[in-house]
Amino acid sequence: MNEQTVLLITDDAQFSRDIIGRWQMERAVPVFTLMSSEVWSLSHAAPCDLAIVGGMHDGHLSVVLRELESLGIPTICVAEEFGLHLLRSEFARVLAIRQHDAWLDSVVVLSGEVLRRVEATARVKRAEAAAHASICNAALGKYMLDARHGFNNALTSVLGNAELLLLEPAALPERMREQIDTIHNMALRLHEMMQRFSSLELEMYFTERESHSENKGAPQAYLSGT
């Protein structure tokens, strides 16, 4: 699991100290990046898995939340009671928490859930990418299998003609003999590569057969009715 990053956007130093200090009590602590609303407006974006916003100067909160929402960054906003309704109505994707007595515990618990969901989503995306790569590799392998016979026929022709020419060295200039000898050697290397490919295919075939045989021979469990 990659180290996760939490972006703290606040104009109140105590706000960030409280959150980081409370999070230090947890077993898993992310990497924190701290920004004020002015710095955020200049930087526009910072790589992170979660943003926590609070303790901000008047007029800056809406701008920051709107930018975070447009970037698709999961965001938790800590606000006073009177501002919660406006936040929830204007920013539907922002998780708003009232700054009550136990707000630090609420922030850390909710943040942990968000980060776990982010990690799960990342795992799904990695699995989908790996599956897509496997499909592409399988398609490439199938193409190589389909083209193998034609490639071998062409390679046999190149090898045969090169060997015939090399049997009559006196009929060719020395420079041409060297070039034909190079063609012959490269064709032999290609032939060796194709032989290895065929051996790998045969090995995979027998491995698959053994796997099917083991599955068929495995004991089956049956439920008996009463």
Image: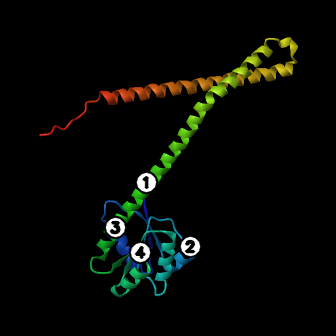
Residue sitting farthest toward the front: 226
Mark sitting earlier along the chain (3/4) = 3
Quarter that holds the C terminus: top left
Mark sitting earlier along the chain (1/4) = 4
Tell me where residue 84 sits by quadrant.
bottom left
Mark sitting earlier along the chain (1/2) = 2
1 and 2 marks in contact (CB < 8 Å): no
Q: Residue at x 60, y 33 (%)?
A: 144
Could you say where residue 89 lies in the image, as x and y percent from the top left? 40, 82
- As helix, strand or loop, the secondary structure at mark 4 comes to loop
Q: Residue at x 63, y 31 (%)?
A: 147
User: Between tags 4 and 2, which lies in front?
Assistant: 4
Mark 1 → mark 3, Cα distance in angstroms: 27 Å
Mark 4 → mark 2, Cα distance in angstroms: 21 Å
Binning the other alpha carbons within 10 Å of mark 4 as few (below 14), some (14 to 19) or many (20 upward) gives many
In this view, 199 is above or below 58: above
Q: Which residue is mark 1?
A: 124
Q: Which residue is mark 4?
A: 94
